[in-house]
């Protein structure tokens, strides 16, 4: 296993490269399938187990081996390449979600977003009419709708994907584990102030140069 420090958004990023990296055919790779595979795995776990599960089994890779090679060689373009790959991942992901649960316009209304989330809601042992689940979805949508236009667009989904890969010290490794997914999902649905409330705007501004 090799560890490198990469400057991304002005922050030192710890990047791990190991033999269990999944080599994917980018033309056939489906972000929606990757996350479906993850949530299927989570359904077989207890909630407490999933919240602590940080192994790479059934994780979702955001980057390719080229990026990991760049990171471990100290390439100064690693940060820009990371953004490029995450944006590409999110672009494919929102299109797939919208094609399956929405109207295909490339944006997610609350109803479309909720429908996609309810498809895997058994992860949290909720049912469709559970009031707690409904409120959690409203909280999550509010946090993700950065420009408050009542839809989640490609930029906002990009921010979510990137946020899943961050730890509390702003480190990334290009891989979303079950622990990362659960941590982000729980914070998104929270009624309280959480780390994501600062992280999401920071990533949005970093990726899209908003003031």
Image (cartoon, rainbow, N blue to C red):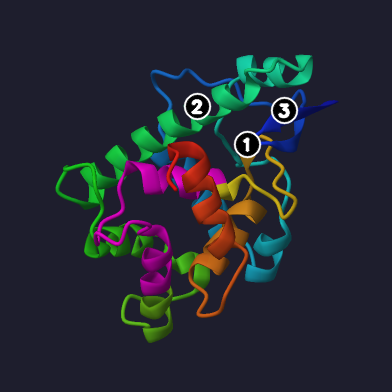
Tag 1: Cα neighbours inside 10 Å, few (<14), some, or many (≥20)?
some
Tag 2: Cα neighbours inside 10 Å, few (<14), some, or many (≥20)?
some
Q: Quick one: label 1 or label 2, which is nearer the N terminus?
A: 1
> Disc 3 vs disc 2: Cβ atoms closer than 8 Å?
no
Query: Which picture quadrant has residue 60?
Result: top right
Q: CA distance from mark 1 to mark 3?
A: 27 Å
Instruction: Say if 193 sits above or below 18 in the image.
Output: below
Report the quarter where the N terminus lies: top right
Q: CA distance from mark 3 to mark 2?
A: 19 Å
Q: Which residue is mark 1?
A: 9
Query: Which picture quadrant has residue 208?
Result: top left
- Disc 3 element: loop
- Disc 1 element: loop
* In magenta segment, residue 158: yes
Q: Quick one: label 3 or label 2, which is nearer the N terminus?
A: 3
Q: Which residue is mark 2?
A: 85
**Place of residue 133 in the rendered image (x, y in percent of width and height, measured from the top left):** 41, 77
Residue 161 at least partly seen: no
Instruction: Say if 142 sits above or below 151 in the image.
Output: below
Looking at the image, which residue is at 40% across and 47% down? Answer: 157
**Place of residue 23 in the rendered image (x, y in percent of width and height, measured from the top left):** 59, 20
> Disc 1 vs disc 3: Cβ atoms closer than 8 Å?
no
Q: Which residue is mark 3?
A: 20
Q: Is residue 11 left or right of residue 128?
A: right
Looking at the image, which residue is at 62% across and 27% down? Answer: 79
């Amino acid at each position: 296993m090799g560890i490198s420090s990469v400057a991304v958004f002005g922050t030192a990023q710890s990047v791990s490269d190991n033999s269990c990296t999944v080599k994917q055919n980018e033309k056939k790779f489906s972000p929606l399938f990757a996350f479906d595979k993850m949530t299927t795995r989570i359904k077989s776990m207890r909630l407490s187990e999933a919240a602590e599960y940080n192994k790479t089994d059934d994780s979702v890779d955001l980057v390719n081996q080229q990026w990991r090679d760049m990171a471990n060689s100290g390439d100064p373009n690693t940060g820009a390449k990371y953004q490029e790959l995450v944006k590409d991942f999110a672009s494919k992901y929102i299109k797939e979600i919208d094609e399956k649960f929405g109207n295909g316009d490339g944006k997610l209304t609350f109803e479309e977003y909720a429908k996609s989330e309810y498809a895997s809601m058994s992860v949290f042992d909720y049912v469709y009419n559970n009031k707690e689940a409904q409120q959690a979805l409203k909280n999550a949508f509010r946090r993700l709708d950065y420009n408050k236009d009542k839809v989640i667009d490609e930029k906002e989904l990009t921010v979510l994907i990137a946020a899943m890969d961050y730890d509390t010290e702003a480190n990334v490794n290009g891989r979303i584990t079950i622990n990362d997914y659960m941590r982000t999902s729980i914070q998104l649905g929270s009624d309280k102030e959480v780390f994501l409330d600062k992280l999401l705007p920071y990533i949005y501004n970093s990726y899209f140069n908003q003031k």
